[in-house]
Image (cartoon, rainbow, N blue to C red):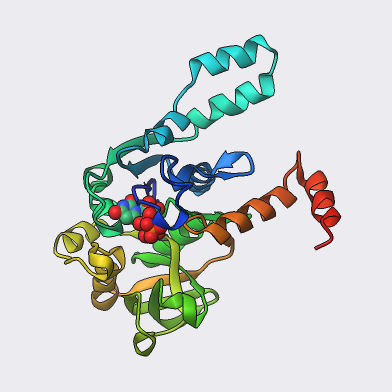
Amino acid sequence: MKIKKAVIPAAGLGTRVLPASKSCPKEMLNIVDKPAIQYIVEEAVKSGIEDILIITNRGKGVIEDHFDRSPELEERLLASGKQAMYDEVVAISKLANINFVRQKETKGLGHAIMCAESFVGNEPFAVLYGDDVIMGEDPVCGQLCRAYEKYGKGVVGIKEVSMEAIQKYSSMKTQHIEGNLYGISDMIEKPKPEEVFSLFSILGRCVLPPQIFEILRNTKPGAGNEIQLTDAMKQLAVTEGMIGVDFVGTRYDMGNKLGILKATVETALNHKEVGDDFREYLKSLKL
Ligand code: UTP
């Protein structure tokens, strides 16, 4: 079954990137000349997704504005002959069929996903975490959708991380299947060192069957007293098994300050307009 719907949770408080995220959602923080969430929407579209639901909350209306038309700005660009920029600005509003819903209380990623139930209906859907930008030739969301289509099971994007990092993320119990694909039979959110299954952690992307909503309804608050998506996916992994894709792509965590800097520097170095000058500038710093 082709995956056509995607959910982008973007209703977190972003406390790790304060004060930048006090009035500007972290998902709207810039990577050179585009907000992080635009890279994520573009990845979903390149993966064949047609309908997107972005989960927002109070104070994040600027995300809706970004994907809307902007008549005054467009008129000014046309009048001053800036056709290329006009085309780029209009294209943002036509990227996909983008919908919005508000998570009324910040009760965790699992709770945010529950807000997508009526949008998703009874079909599998992709989840792209709103603060994880992943760059690469082959969009990672598409890599996961292909695995779902092949195995008919929930899929998570995984990568090996350090022992220190895994305690802040999640840890997967894996069995190698083929190539970069793994069977997942258990998982744990924010494990203590003695609870770590492997150094494979979920990073930013998954494809889930609609049964996840029933599981989420019965999932009690976990780490941080939030309803954790990992706790619900654990149920799926234990009962039906899930697939892990050790994806190909470079992931930037826009939820922390160093991640934002890495995304900015690496994207700037490869940027058509400013890349060469930026490289010269960095060299001139004689670090
Ligand atoms: P994070 O845990 O990284 O986001 O959630 P956070 O809560 O904003 O982080 P800090 O710790 O306060 O800095 C991963 C994704 O889930 C969304 C976030 O917006 C992010 O994209 N999220 C998290 C929600 O949509 N709702 C929530 O209640 C929590």
In this view, the residue farthest toward the left is: 218
Residue 213 position within the rendered picture, expressed as x and y whole percent measured from the top left: 21, 57
- Relative vertical location of residue 88 with respect to residue 32 in this rendering, above or below: above
Tell me the residue at 58%/40% (across/down): 34
Quadrant where the C terminus lies? bottom right
Residues 121 and 161: in front is: 161
Check the image and report above or below for 166 versus 153: below
| The N terminus: image quadrant | bottom left
Ligand 1 is in which quadrant of the figure?
A: bottom left
Q: In this view, does 111 lie to the left or right of 46?
A: left
Q: Is residue 65 visible?
A: yes
Q: Which of 23 and 30 is in front in this view?
A: 23
Residue 125 in sight from this viewpoint: no
Q: Which residue is at a point 68% across and 12% down the rendered structure image?
A: 80
Q: Is residue 220 above or below residue 22?
A: below
- The residue nearer to you, when weighing 85 against 152, is 85
In the rendered image, residue 149, in percent from the top left (x then y), is placed at: 41, 60
Compared across the picture, whether 72 is left or right of 129 comes to right
Residue 186 lies in quadrant:
bottom left
Horizontal and vertical percent for residue 119?
A: 26, 42
At x 61%, y 28%, the residue is: 88
Number of numbered discs overlaid on the protein picture: 0
Give the residue drawn at x 50%, y 15%. 71
> Furthest-bottom residue in view?
194
Q: x, y (%) of residue 281?
A: 81, 49
* Quarter location, residue 79: top right
User: Which residue appears farthest toward the top when viewing the image?
Assistant: 79
Q: Is residue 9 left or right of residue 76?
A: left
